[in-house]
Image (cartoon, grey):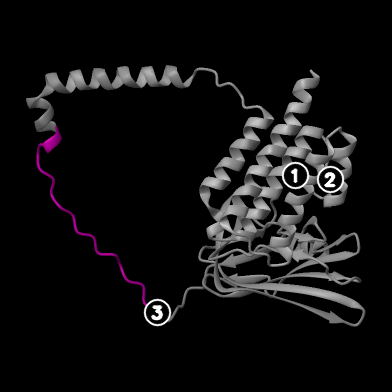
Amino acid sequence: MKWLLHILCVLSVSFSFGQKLNINLDKEEVQIGEPFKLTLSVISDKKFDSLVYIPKEEVFSGKNSVNSNSDEISEDYGLEITKAFKDTTYKEGKEFIWKGSYELIAWDSAYVVIPPEMILIQDSLYLFPAGLISVMSPPANPTQPIYDINENFTDLPDKSAIEKFISQYWPWVVIGLILFIGIGIYLFKRSRKEEIPLTLRESTLLQIDELERSKAYEIDLKEYYFDLSMILRRFFAAHYQIRILDKTTLEIESILEENGLDDEMILLTRQLLVQSDLVKFAKSVPGIKEIQDVTNDARRVVNEIADIDFNNE
């Protein structure tokens, strides 16, 4: 385990266009129920004009590694968040630093991999390095006695109630079983019918509809606008077959203009992305009517772009 932890320490610094992204665990090994601290940091030689990190609540999702010498990730592993996420931004010398930290507790022995966390800096998406912590069972205390588990057993009746029911009403049981099997076969054959895959337009509009029905803006307005802008960005990326998730609003405008989108739709797209940025970074609080208008405008952009290619075919 030591060699893997040392490798992760070496790789725990990520450089991205002038930003240095770090992850730090204050302990390499903990016992079950022992709190430890996870710290994320970004170091830059320029002031952060915009930086967005969406913190976890209640549970921090990790992955359970088979062992310290294996790259295989077997299953999800939830780390309990015992103290709410806290972050701060400050200047040290010529460097601008952002730090955020969690206090976590693990409740099962495992080698827990901390997956890369995402952060939005200057309208571009970056990933922190991964981390690893070993969660060990506490050692047995030789001074404490070990007690046996007392088990009580209940005698079962000679014939169960189910057997009595079947023996008394077996004709109806057979009929019910035949009907059950027939319905099962019908549903199975029906489910095997080939499903028509959704087009990019249909799948994107479906995502927007699901987001709107969730009314996530009533819980977290920033997350709603972030999700809406990411749906549009993924649509642009899939439609034009280019990387666009890390592009700025101005770069997206240029791409849309190069691909024949008219000025009205380019302006509408700009307003959508700028509105999303205002909510995320400037603490703008739009009303319900404005939220509904922005969501409908996103649908309009998707339909207009999809119609351009349809008419050109």
**Which residue lies under the disc numbered 3?**
144
The amino acid type of the residue labelled 2 equals Ile
Coordinates of residue 225 in the picture (x, y in percent): 66, 54
Which residue is rendered at x = 70% and y = 64% of the image?
53
**In the rendered image, which quarter is residue 216 located in?**
bottom right
Coordinates of residue 146 in the picture (x, y in percent): 36, 72
- Which mark, residue 152? none
Q: Answer with left or right where residue 178 lies relative to residue 92.
A: left
In the rendered structure, which segment of residues is drawn in magenta? 144-162
**Which residue lies under the disc numbered 2?**
252
Which residue is rendered at x = 23% and y = 60% of the image?
151
Q: In which quarter of the image is the C terminus?
A: top right
Up-down: is 138 above or below 177? Answer: below
Mark 3 surroundings: few (<14), some (14-19) or many (≥20) residues within 10 A: few
User: Marks 3 and 2, how far apart in space?
Assistant: 67 Å
Q: Which of marks 3 and 2 is nearer the N terminus?
A: 3
The amino acid type of the residue labelled 3 equals Gln
Q: Which of marks 3 and 1 is nearer the N terminus?
A: 3
User: Marks 3 and 1, how far apart in space?
Assistant: 60 Å
**Which residue lies under the disc numbered 1?**
233
Asked whether disc 3 touches disc 1, contact meaning CB atoms under 8 Å apart, the reply is no
Coordinates of residue 97 in the picture (x, y in percent): 82, 75
The amino acid type of the residue labelled 1 equals Arg
